[in-house]
Image (cartoon, rainbow, N blue to C red):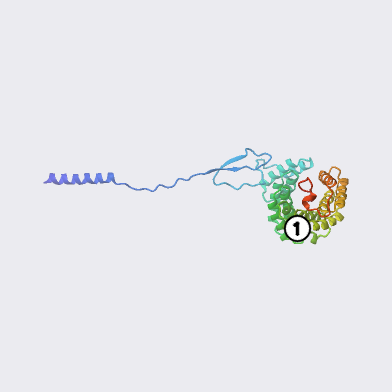
Amino acid sequence: MKNQIVAAVAAALAFTACEGSTRTTTVTPKPTPVIVSKVVPALSMPDSGLPFAKVDEPVQPVDALALKHDARSVDHVARARQLMEAQDPKGALTEARRALFSSPSDAETLELIAKLGRTAGQPSISAEAWGRLAQQRPSDAVVCIKQARAFLQAKDFVGAIAAGKEASTRDPGNPEAFQATGIAQLASGDLIGAITSFRTVVALQPDHGYAMNNLGLAYLRANRNDEAVEILEEAIEQLPTVAYVHNNLGVAYERVGRGDDAKHAFQEAMDLSPKYVKARINAARVAKAPVEEEATPDETMSDIPHPMPETGPTP
């Protein structure tokens, strides 16, 4: 009997062990962190390395202006000014951007970068610097106007329009805010917006000859030729020695059928600027194909795809 009991206990233990060996315990694995690598463009800088830099997540914001360096004890602003005096704007800009690495919000350094950017042929950097100064000076319209002009030089017309409109919001009485906006609108093909902006400039400053010229050009592109003649004649009174204003008036005269006046205007442009190619092309066209009194704009163009008026300089 004792042996039977021992055998039963042994069998029970054997069964328990077998059951334990087949039992499955489900364990949810913890997710393994994944580091994603991505390729981001490197900044186009004088001393930049490869065109692309590979970095790991999380990607830290890249400062579009400051240049990283290890020479903490060097006075980079002083170096920048020395290079400016030595007529080395690109080198001066590099030093100014290195100075910004140590003092990211320093207004003096930002203004130095903003001025050097356009001189060094890097207007996008200039626009970025003026934009940061505009954030620091929320009531200053002038920094927004300067940013708009830098955007214009960079051919970033969307940015120029935004900066110009911000300037006109800050100071609705500043004609240069509307002038910068109008030039960008004209360049981007927004003729209605450009006409409105230039007319505002002339209303604020009636002797603004460059705005009158640009308004005349916008009228020409909109085929509002009579209005172009009127405003360009006023522009000539303000800018009698600017050759391209005479050229633009000549185009307007040609469009409305005033051939003799067009010849005279083109001749004035060439007298003022003997190497003025556009005026010579326009004068040659008019001389070969006299404009009829009832001529349409297409007929006055002769074999030239389009008469060649042009906008005034960006301040």
Rendering quarter of residue 122: top right
Residue holding disc 1: 195
Task: Report if residue 313 is visible in the image.
Answer: no
Which residue extends farthest top? 50
Q: Nearer the viewer, residue 264 or 257?
A: 257
Rendering quarter of residue 273: top right
Name the spot of residue 236 as percent of width and height, x first. 86, 54
Residue 238 in the figure: left or right of residue 162: right
SS type, badge 1: helix
Name the spot of residue 10 as percent of width and height, x first. 19, 44
Mark 1 crowdedness (10 Å alpha carbons): few <14, some 14-19, many ≥20: many
Which residue extends farthest left? 1
Image height of 44 relative to 251, above or below = above
Number of on-image labels: 1
Name the spot of residue 172 as percent of width and height, x first. 74, 61
Task: Report if residue 164 is visible in the image.
Answer: yes
Q: Nearer the viewer, residue 160 or 294?
A: 294
At horizontal 80% and vertical 61% (from top left) the residue drawn is: 203
Residue 28 in the figure: left or right of residue 208: left
At horizontal 88% and vertical 50% (from top left) the residue drawn is: 264
Name the spot of residue 260 as percent of width and height, x first. 87, 51
Under mark 1, the amino acid is Ile
Q: Nearer the viewer, residue 60 or 257?
A: 257
At horizontal 27% and vertical 46% (from top left) the residue drawn is: 20
Residue 304 in the figure: left or right of residue 272: left
